[in-house]
Image: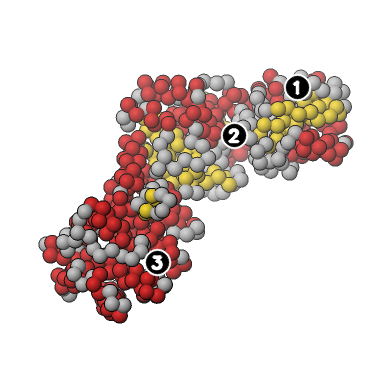
Amino acid sequence: MFHRLYELARCLPERAGWERLNEGMPDLYDRGLALCFGPAGEWRGVRTYQGSQGVLYRSGPPNGTDFTPCCKLAGNTANRLAGAVAVCAEAPEFSDEQRDWLSASLETFHTSQNDIWAEVETARRQAGIDDKTHRGYVYWADELMRPVHGWPEMRERLVRQVTESFADKGGARDDGCCAVCGRESVRVYGNYAVLACYNLNNPGSIAGGFRANAAHRNFPVCGDCALSIADTFTFANTYLASRMAGQTYLILPYSNSDEVREQLRARLSRQPQRYSLGQARDLVADEWELLHEFGDQGDQLALALIFYRQQNAAWRVQAEVQHLLPSRLHELHDAARRIERAPDLIAISKKDEQPVRISALTFKTFAGGSDNASEETLRDWLAALFAGESIARRYLLHALVARLIDTGKRNPSLLHWMTRHAWGLYRYARHVRFILDDSMEALPAMSDAIPNSPYGNYVREHADFFRRPELVVAFLTGCYAAQVTSVQRQERGADPFAKKFVGRVLTRQHLQRLYREGHAKLAQYGKLGYVIAGLDPDLANAWVVGGDTWAISDEEATFAFTIGYSLAYRIGQLAREAGAAAPAPSLDAA
């Protein structure tokens, strides 16, 4: 990842060290409160600065101070800001007069801290800082509101303080070789913690080894690379970080083509905000402007995709895709549009049409609940999806059926909606090669098991799933159950028959029993006419063709059944619209 950041740095404008380190203030922090002190360090009051232009700010550790006397407004801001001023008052970069003034103003602050901070709170309210639409920051200044963070010497101080911090715990070496750029005979540092993704106090950690002060031997980084990557990481965090389906991720574009790198530099230099991912960008479903503009370059521009977790000072890589190609993203988007246009997956209501839209949230829906295991499953799935890798078909099928069973138990009214999305995700996974075929092969007897009806046509359209007579049996049994529940709902205003299969894993014996009991129910209501000339003999024939062989799992049977149960009405509706011989209509829409 460090190398990817270094490569991205080559596509960004060259800047001085202090500019690379300057994080500035996020747009939301648009109210500055200046603590103003006179020439002798006497208190002159709080004044408000609109905006955050020109702010020199770099955050420090949560239990320490920031690197400049400018802090985001929070609960511990007073002490944090005073700590930063105290450090500056001892800095050799400043003149004797500057250090004396800082010391005098700091003494004034400590003497009257409660009164001064009461003025800060008043100014905060008057400035409209609500910590929602407007947030604030506080900085040290003279009586003319000229900030200390704007002193030219502060820039030198910032660079020296940050680079020294790299050597504080991890050590340094004057004649080393940088692990990032490869330069030799340069000063290298060991505590390269811009990403904070390792802890030097933990034995065996990435950079520290078993001796924290030997970190520079394991992962030496020169000062130039440290500042360059720090700057690039800030840029990436600002524009190239986002979330999808609850997963935080970072995108780092790179290219081996000098021409593409130059184009990338030009675009990111002029209008980086144009290519910002924003707070929520679903890469499975959404296009990205940057890739759109490089569409004629093929796969010369690639992406490193890093899923990470940031908590306090810890930054952890959780999954990586080193080579995400634009062609793969285009393939994913094309497949998603294909599923969205699938007429059988569109739910028709009185108000509008509701297609199935595949996104990262779709994967999250079927990855499980909200526990750590399901979060890990989702990351594994997304990483494999973007990398063009595959998982075994049975694993995805297990997850789909588990969600359908859970929905049937907890909220059966959503079962049809969930089935459409499960079936859509399965087909999408086939299109993009996310699942591998099992060893199950289509049998010659399939032609005898498939009826000459809209249901049979549907089976043929999806022959890659319906590869055995047993799956046809399960599917037609689901269509049969839909007919029974529809009749029962009209006759009784309820469908207790559905309780026999909704929220349950279905075995061969269970399907046989549903067929018998469903036939009896239709006879009881005098509605055998709906199935006697079509679905009933077709299902009976499928059972006969299957014979004593039953080579599918209970999960496959359950999935095929649920597809039939939830889509039977829609299949018949499409057949009627096409003018084909359709099955007898259900009395209501599923």
Q: Are marks 2 and 3 in contact (CB under 8 Å)?
A: no
Question: Mark 1 and 3 residues: CB-CB less than 8 Å, in contact?
Answer: no
In the image: residue 293, left or right of residue 94:
left
- Residue 154 position (above or below residue 589): above
Mark 3 residue type: Ile
Q: Is residue 97 left or right of residue 318?
A: right
Horizontal and vertical percent for residue 93? 71, 22
Label 1 sits on residue: 146
Residue 118 sits above or below residue 575 on the image: above
Horizontal side of residue 211 vs 245, given as left or right: right
Q: Quadrant of the N terminus?
A: top left
Structural crowding at the residue carrying mark 3, measured as other residues with C-alpha within 10 Å and reported as few (<14), some (14–19) or many (≥20):
many
| Residue holding disc 2 | 166
**Residue type beneath disc 1:** Arg
Where is residue 101 drawn, in percent x and y? 82, 24
Look at the numbered disc 1 and give the secondary structure of its residue: loop
Q: Residue at x 28, y 74 (%)?
A: 527
